[in-house]
Image: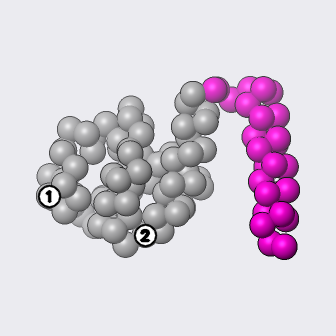
Amino acid sequence: MGLNKLELGKYLRELRTLKSETLHQVSKGTDIDSPLLSKIERSERLPTSEQIKRLAEYYKISEEKLKIQHVAEKILKDYGANDITFNAVKLVNEQLINYNKKNKK
């Protein structure tokens, strides 16, 4: 299953399971302690930018995709899934389109 279909934590757990590795092995390879990795995989905690970088390097996956998913989940966690959040994201999208147009000139 791809990242867009899963929460970030579940996706990371799936990657670890596909590699048949333990939390301890991933912990050693990423320098992120096992209890924290467990919380990340259970979506009880979002990883920091540095942790995302380490996990992307460890699993040899796109850091950018992990960061995008992280931001999306953070927005939903902090603001909830509701009309205000939906409209705010639409507004940000419009502002980003204008930003990109200005910077391409």
Q: Position of residue 2 (x, y in %)?
A: 54, 61
Residue shown at 56% from the left, 40% from the top: 73
Q: Looking at the image, which is closer to me, 97 or 45?
A: 97
Q: Is residue 29 left or right of residue 87?
A: left
Q: Position of residue 72 (x, y in %)?
A: 60, 44
Res. 61 mark: 2
Q: Looking at the image, which is closer to me, 78 or 19?
A: 78
Q: How is the image coloured?
A: one colour
Q: Looking at the image, which is closer to me, 21 or 83?
A: 83
Q: Quadrant of residue 30?
A: bottom left
Q: Regarding mark 2 in the picture, which secondary structure is present there?
A: loop
Callout 2: few (<14), some (14-19), or many (20+) C-alpha neighbours within 10 Å?
few
In the image, residue 103 lies in the stretch drawn in magenta: yes
Q: Which one is earlier in the sequence, the residue at label 1 or at label 2?
A: 1
Res. 2 mark: none
Q: Where's the C terminus, which quadrant?
A: bottom right
Q: Is residue 66 left or right of residue 80?
A: left
Q: Position of residue 60 (x, y in %)?
A: 37, 72
Dominant secondary structure of the magenta stretch? helix
Res. 28 mark: 1
The magenta-colored residue range is 79-105
Mark 1–mark 2 Cα distance, whole angstroms, equals 18 Å
Q: Position of residue 22 (x, y in %)?
A: 19, 55
The image shows residue 87, relative to residue 6, as above or below, that is: above
Q: Amino acid at mark 1?
A: Lys
Residue shown at 51% from the left, 47% from the top: 70
